[in-house]
Each structure stands twice: as structure tokens, then as C-alpha cells.
Image: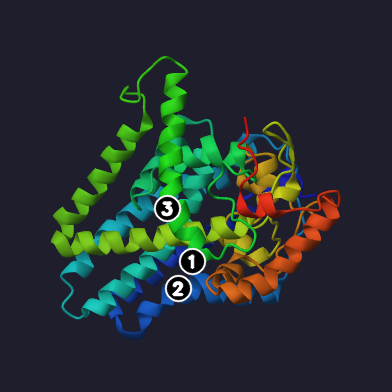
């Protein structure tokens, strides 16, 4: 157990600030061009995959009852990132749009790398911020998501995913044997609709129409429109294209992670549309130390769904007796997810063992595999 006195020091928090090292890497790519445009994907994926192999697992847990007052350095990380990402994104759009030393391909590759930042870091930090009760932090989450044109993720995540994870009503829970190439277009289509429907139904319970000003979709659309307009003002139509490039990459990064986090894991249907409560066993856990520093403990996903209001430094890691374990961290697993035969070879046996361990009484999994169990009430 990490003591409160140790946890609250800047020295303990500073490894999580490693994401800020990606900002100068983005500028090196933009200024130098050439082979340096590959640095951001290499640094975010392959370097951290290698570091996970070198430094191993982090099995230490902090006291989950640590008060917010002792987490100043951790809260500051996600808050400060928002203006840093905003300035980086739009200053790069201004600079790269008219950069004569960069070819069209190099410009696109620079913003492919920027999308890795705004997805791997930005959307991840927005996820941490949206789970907080502070209005400021939730607004900052909205700003980060608007930078990648995926604002509805907040509504879908809080109102749909956490409530219905592991059931047929959750679009994000990847089904057993469902390749990412099928999963990705499905979630792009279903998540936007389910998010809007959740907000509409929430207003209807208050006898309000979906057009009521409290519908957050109006804020989402305004923020996204403002971001796109700023890209046009700074870089013209080329700037808008670069903005869209990074947004597309960021969304792809998010949904790759979503695919990995719950692949094949379903909650038991108890009959009449009732499902068991969410437990740590309904999310894949990964204790790889280096990538958990970059991703602010996102890989401790089993605990996040069990206790979604916990801030990231307090998330607990679980052993094999409590939660299923990924064989590698997200940098490796998301790459594997892009190769369906490899993914099935690695993960399908693990899902089958998970089913046998926790649900030996279920002998027919076809309804779970196809998502045809009754919708939860």
C-alpha cells in the first residue's frame, strides 16, 4: 500500500506527467519533417511497449480513501493539459498549413502523430475529467472532446456505457469473435445514436423536449463548430483538413482502446431483462507500469468500472483471482487488435477460460456472443 504521505508528493506524481514530453516531439516532427514525422507514433506505441517489457508490472495500490486535498499534483496534470493541447494543436495547424518545407504527405503524417496525442492523451484525460463532480473539470472534458469532434462520448460513456457495460444495450462492449474491422463502424454508428437517445430520455423524464437548452448536445455542437472554424481561420481549408485528420486518428485510438477493455466479457443475464451488478471481472486489467504512467492508470479498468468515481491515482489493480488479465499493456494489445486473426488467437482462449472460471453453469453462450439477450430494464 502506498501511504498518503508518499502519494501526495510531487516526486510520486511526476512520472504521470510524462505525456508532456510528447509536445516537443510534435514540434520536432513539424519543423524537421522527413523521418521525424514517425516519432510520435513510435514514441507513443513502440517505446512504451518496450518500456513495459523492461520495467514490468506495478502491483502497488494507493489508499482508495485518500482525500482529494492530497491529490493536487494529479488533478493539476489533467487540468493543465487542456490549454497545452489547445495551444499545441492550433499553433501546429497555423505553422504546418503554410510550411513550404513539408510535402502534403509529411503534413498529413505530422497530424497523424498529433492525433495520437489528442487521442491517446487528450481523450484519455477527458475521460478522467468527465467523471469528476467539478463543473470546471467537466467543462474541460468537453473542450478536449470538441478538439477531436467526439463530444457525444461524454454522454455515451456516463449515461450508457457505465450503466449497461457487458449487456446488449452497450455498443462499446466488443462481442466475442467480433473483429475490430466490424466493431469500429458499428460503434461509430451506434454510439452517437445511443448518446443522443440517452440525453433525450433524460430530459423526457423531466417532461422537457430534446430541444431544451439544457441538452448538452447544443454545447457539444457549438464547441465543435468553434474548433473547426478556428482551424479554418488559422490554416484555411488545408488547416481544416489537418484538423479532421488528427480528429479521425484520435477517434480511432479511443475506439481501439474501448475494443480491448471489455472484449468478450459479459454480465450474466438473470432473467426478465435483469443482469448481475458490475464487478472487476467484467473488464480486462493490465498492470504494466510504463504504459499505466502514460495512460494515467486507464489500464486499471477493472477497478474503474467497479468504482467509477475514483480518481486515477487511487485506482486499484487486481490479481488473477479477481479480474481477467491482459497479456500485455494497451500499446501492444491495440496493435494486435488491428490484426483480427492474431487478436482471436491471443484473446479467444482467455475469454473461454474466463467463462469457465466465473460462469461454469452457462453452457450456451450464443446469445451472449451475438448480443441477442434481452435488453436490460
Residue 31 at x, y percent in the picture = 28, 76
Along the line of sight, which residue is nearer the eye, 333 or 16? 333
Real-space Cα separation, disc 1 to disc 3, in angstroms: 12 Å
Neighbourhood count class around disc 1 (C-alpha, 10 Å): few under 14, some 14–19, many 20 upward:
few
Q: Which mark is residue 310?
A: none
Can you tell which mark lies on residue 41? 2
Note whether 158 is above or below 317 in the view shown: above
Say whether disc 2 or disc 3 marks the residue closer to the N-terminus.
Answer: 2
Residue lying farthest top? 207
User: Residue 198: percent from the left, percent from the top?
Assistant: 46, 32
Q: Is residue 305 above or below residue 19?
A: above
Residue 356 horizontal side relative to residue 192, left or right: right
Q: Quadrant of residue 258?
A: bottom right
Q: Disc number at residue 188? A: 3
Residue at 54% from the left image edge and 50% from the top image edge: 172
Residue 91 in the image: state x and y as whole percent.
25, 60
Q: Which of label 1 and label 2 is nearer to you?
A: 1
Q: Mark 1 or mark 3: which comes first in sequence?
A: 1
Compared with residue 73, is residue 135 higher up or lower down, i.e. above or below?
A: above
Task: Mark yes or no: residue 42 visible.
Answer: yes
- Identify the residue under disc 1: 181
Amino acid at each position: 500500500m502506498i501511504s498518503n504521505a508518499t502519494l501526495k508528493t510531487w516526486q510520486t506524481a511526476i512520472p504521470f506527467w510524462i505525456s508532456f514530453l510528447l509536445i516537443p516531439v510534435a514540434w520536432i516532427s513539424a519543423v524537421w519533417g522527413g523521418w521525424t514525422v514517425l516519432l510520435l507514433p513510435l514514441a507513443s506505441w513502440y517505446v512504451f511497449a518496450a518500456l513495459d517489457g523492461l520495467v514490468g508490472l506495478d502491483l502497488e495500490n494507493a489508499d482508495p480513501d485518500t482525500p482529494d486535498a492530497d491529490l493536487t499534483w494529479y488533478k493539476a496534470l489533467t487540468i493543465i493539459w487542456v490549454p497545452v493541447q489547445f495551444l499545441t494543436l492550433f499553433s501546429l495547424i497555423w505553422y504546418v498549413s503554410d510550411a513550404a518545407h513539408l510535402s502534403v504527405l509529411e503534413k498529413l503524417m505530422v497530424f497523424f502523430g498529433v492525433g495520437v496525442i489528442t487521442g491517446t492523451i487528450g481523450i484519455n484525460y477527458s475521460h478522467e475529467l468527465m467523471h469528476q463532480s467539478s463543473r470546471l473539470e467537466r467543462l474541460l472534458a468537453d473542450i478536449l472532446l470538441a478538439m477531436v469532434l467526439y463530444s457525444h462520448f461524454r454522454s455515451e460513456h456516463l449515461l450508457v456505457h457505465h450503466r449497461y457495460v457487458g449487456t446488449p444495450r452497450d455498443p462499446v462492449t466488443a462481442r466475442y469473435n467480433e473483429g475490430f474491422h466490424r466493431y469500429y463502424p458499428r460503434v461509430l454508428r451506434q454510439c452517437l445514436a445511443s448518446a443522443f437517445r440517452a440525453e433525450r430520455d433524460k430530459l423526457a423524464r423531466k417532461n422537457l423536449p430534446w430541444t431544451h437548452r439544457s441538452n448538452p448536445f447544443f454545447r457539444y455542437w457549438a464547441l465543435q463548430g468553434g474548433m473547426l472554424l478556428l482551424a479554418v481561420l488559422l490554416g484555411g481549408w488545408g488547416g481544416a483538413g489537418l484538423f479532421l485528420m488528427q480528429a479521425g486518428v484520435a477517434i480511432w485510438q479511443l475506439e481501439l482502446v474501448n475494443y480491448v477493455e471489455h472484449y468478450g466479457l459479459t454480465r450474466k443475464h438473470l432473467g426478465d431483462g435483469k443482469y448481475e451488478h458490475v464487478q472487476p471481472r467484467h473488464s480486462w486489467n493490465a498492470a504494466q507500469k510504463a504504459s499505466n504512467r502514460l495512460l494515467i492508470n486507464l489500464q486499471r479498468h477493472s477497478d474503474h468500472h467497479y468504482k467509477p468515481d475514483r480518481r486515477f491515482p487511487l485506482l486499484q489493480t487486481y490479481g488473477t483471482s479477481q479480474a481477467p488479465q491482459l497479456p500485455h499493456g494497451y500499446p501492444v494489445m491495440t496493435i494486435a487488435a488491428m490484426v483480427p486473426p492474431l487478436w482471436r488467437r491471443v484473446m479467444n482462449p482467455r475469454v473461454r477460460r474466463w467463462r469457465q472460471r466465473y460462469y461454469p453453469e452457462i453452457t450456451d453462450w450464443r446469445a451472449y456472443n451475438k448480443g441477442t439477450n434481452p435488453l436490460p430494464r
